[in-house]
Image: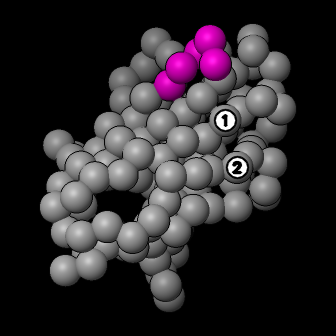
Amino acid sequence: QGQLMESGGGLVQAGGSLRLSCPVSRIITSEFWGSTLAWYRQAPGKQRDLVASTRAGSSTNYADSVKGRFTISRDNARKMVYLQMDKLQPEDTAVYFCNVDTGRTDNWGRGTQVTVSS
Protein backbone atom coordinates (compact mmCIF):
# COMPACT_ATOMS: atom_id res chain seq x y z
CA GLN A 1 0.00 0.00 0.00
CA GLY A 2 1.14 3.51 -0.71
CA GLN A 3 2.35 3.14 -4.27
CA LEU A 4 -0.25 5.64 -5.45
CA MET A 5 -0.91 9.18 -4.25
CA GLU A 6 -4.48 10.39 -4.19
CA SER A 7 -5.35 14.07 -4.01
CA GLY A 8 -8.41 16.28 -4.04
CA GLY A 9 -9.97 15.43 -0.71
CA GLY A 10 -11.09 18.05 1.76
CA LEU A 11 -13.96 19.54 3.70
CA VAL A 12 -17.14 20.39 1.83
CA GLN A 13 -20.71 21.22 2.75
CA ALA A 14 -23.53 18.84 1.96
CA GLY A 15 -24.59 19.23 -1.64
CA GLY A 16 -21.12 20.24 -2.74
CA SER A 17 -18.65 18.57 -5.07
CA LEU A 18 -15.09 17.29 -5.02
CA ARG A 19 -12.88 15.68 -7.63
CA LEU A 20 -10.35 13.11 -6.54
CA SER A 21 -7.29 12.40 -8.67
CA CYS A 22 -4.86 9.51 -8.72
CA PRO A 23 -1.73 9.57 -10.88
CA VAL A 24 -0.49 6.11 -11.81
CA SER A 25 3.04 6.90 -12.93
CA ARG A 26 4.70 3.75 -11.59
CA ILE A 27 2.71 1.38 -13.80
CA ILE A 28 3.76 0.97 -17.40
CA THR A 29 1.32 2.28 -19.96
CA SER A 30 0.45 -1.07 -21.54
CA GLU A 31 -0.45 -2.52 -18.16
CA PHE A 32 -2.47 0.57 -17.21
CA TRP A 33 -4.64 0.23 -20.29
CA GLY A 34 -5.74 -3.26 -19.25
CA SER A 35 -6.04 -2.57 -15.54
CA THR A 36 -9.12 -2.48 -13.38
CA LEU A 37 -9.28 0.95 -11.80
CA ALA A 38 -11.28 1.54 -8.66
CA TRP A 39 -12.01 3.85 -5.77
CA TYR A 40 -12.75 2.52 -2.31
CA ARG A 41 -13.66 4.31 0.89
CA GLN A 42 -13.41 3.58 4.56
CA ALA A 43 -15.33 5.40 7.25
CA PRO A 44 -14.16 5.32 10.89
CA GLY A 45 -14.89 1.95 12.46
CA LYS A 46 -16.11 0.45 9.21
CA GLN A 47 -14.67 -1.83 6.55
CA ARG A 48 -13.25 -0.58 3.29
CA ASP A 49 -15.96 -0.64 0.61
CA LEU A 50 -15.91 -0.39 -3.15
CA VAL A 51 -17.25 2.93 -4.43
CA ALA A 52 -16.69 2.59 -8.18
CA SER A 53 -14.67 0.55 -10.64
CA THR A 54 -13.96 0.58 -14.34
CA ARG A 55 -12.03 -1.49 -16.85
CA ALA A 56 -11.51 -0.88 -20.54
CA GLY A 57 -14.00 -2.96 -22.53
CA SER A 58 -16.13 -3.69 -19.48
CA SER A 59 -18.94 -1.97 -17.68
CA THR A 60 -18.42 0.61 -15.00
CA ASN A 61 -19.77 -0.31 -11.59
CA TYR A 62 -20.93 1.90 -8.73
CA ALA A 63 -22.06 1.25 -5.19
CA ASP A 64 -25.80 1.79 -4.93
CA SER A 65 -25.25 4.63 -2.47
CA VAL A 66 -23.32 6.74 -5.00
CA LYS A 67 -25.09 5.93 -8.28
CA GLY A 68 -26.09 9.09 -10.08
CA ARG A 69 -23.81 11.24 -7.92
CA PHE A 70 -20.27 9.91 -8.46
CA THR A 71 -18.43 9.32 -11.73
CA ILE A 72 -15.21 7.36 -12.18
CA SER A 73 -13.09 8.17 -15.20
CA ARG A 74 -9.64 7.49 -16.61
CA ASP A 75 -7.15 9.30 -18.79
CA ASN A 76 -5.07 6.64 -20.51
CA ALA A 77 -2.67 9.13 -22.07
CA ARG A 78 -1.83 10.71 -18.73
CA LYS A 79 -2.33 7.53 -16.70
CA MET A 80 -4.76 9.17 -14.32
CA VAL A 81 -7.84 7.96 -12.45
CA TYR A 82 -10.50 10.39 -11.28
CA LEU A 83 -13.57 10.29 -9.09
CA GLN A 84 -16.00 13.16 -9.57
CA MET A 85 -18.25 13.39 -6.54
CA ASP A 86 -21.36 15.54 -6.73
CA LYS A 87 -24.25 16.10 -4.34
CA LEU A 88 -22.07 14.99 -1.46
CA GLN A 89 -23.76 13.93 1.75
CA PRO A 90 -22.43 13.57 5.32
CA GLU A 91 -22.57 9.78 4.93
CA ASP A 92 -19.94 10.10 2.18
CA THR A 93 -17.41 11.15 4.81
CA ALA A 94 -14.51 8.68 4.68
CA VAL A 95 -10.95 8.13 3.58
CA TYR A 96 -10.96 7.44 -0.15
CA PHE A 97 -8.41 5.06 -1.69
CA CYS A 98 -7.34 4.62 -5.28
CA ASN A 99 -6.74 1.05 -6.47
CA VAL A 100 -5.17 -0.19 -9.67
CA ASP A 101 -5.20 -3.94 -10.31
CA THR A 102 -3.05 -4.79 -13.29
CA GLY A 103 -3.66 -8.53 -12.93
CA ARG A 104 -0.02 -8.86 -12.01
CA THR A 105 0.13 -6.31 -9.19
CA ASP A 106 -2.47 -4.78 -6.88
CA ASN A 107 -1.64 -1.14 -6.17
CA TRP A 108 -3.10 1.09 -3.49
CA GLY A 109 -2.79 4.67 -2.38
CA ARG A 110 -2.54 5.93 1.17
CA GLY A 111 -5.93 7.59 0.96
CA THR A 112 -7.34 11.09 0.98
CA GLN A 113 -9.81 12.34 3.57
CA VAL A 114 -13.22 13.55 2.44
CA THR A 115 -15.36 15.23 5.07
CA VAL A 116 -18.88 16.41 4.31
CA SER A 117 -20.53 18.72 6.82
CA SER A 118 -24.28 18.95 7.23
Residue 65 shows which numbered tag? none
Question: Callout 1, which amino acid?
Answer: Pro
Highlighted magenta segment, given as a residue range: 74-78
| 91 sits to left or right of 95 | left
Residue at x 62% of width, y 50% of height: 6
Residue at x 70% of width, y 49% of height: 5
- Evaluate whether residue 104 shows in this view: no
Residue at x 46% of width, y 12% of height: 57
| 105 sits to left or right of 9 | right
To which residue does mark 1 refer? 23
Q: Give yes or no for residue 75 being in the magenta stretch.
A: yes
Q: Give yes or no for residue 103 being in the magenta stretch.
A: no
Residue 65 position, x and y percent, is 23, 58
Residue 2 position, x and y percent, is 79, 56
The reply to whether callout 2 and callout 1 are in contact (CB within 8 Å) is: yes
Q: Nearer the viewer, residue 37 or 116?
A: 116
Q: Quadrant of the C terminus?
A: bottom left
Q: Residues within 10 Å of mark 1 (few under 14, many from 20)?
A: some
Q: Secondary structure at mark 1?
A: strand
Residue 1 position, x and y percent, is 78, 57
Color theme of the render: one colour
| 83 sits to left or right of 64 | right
Q: Secondary structure at mark 2?
A: loop
To which residue does mark 2 refer? 5
Sequence-wise, the earlier of marks 2 and 1 is 2
Name which quarter of the figure residue 105 lies in. top right
- Vertically, is 36 above or below 89? above
- Vertically, is 10 above or below 64? below
Residue at x 50% of width, y 88% of height: 45
Question: Callout 2, which amino acid?
Answer: Met
Task: Report the Cα–Cα distance between label 2 and label 1.
Answer: 7 Å
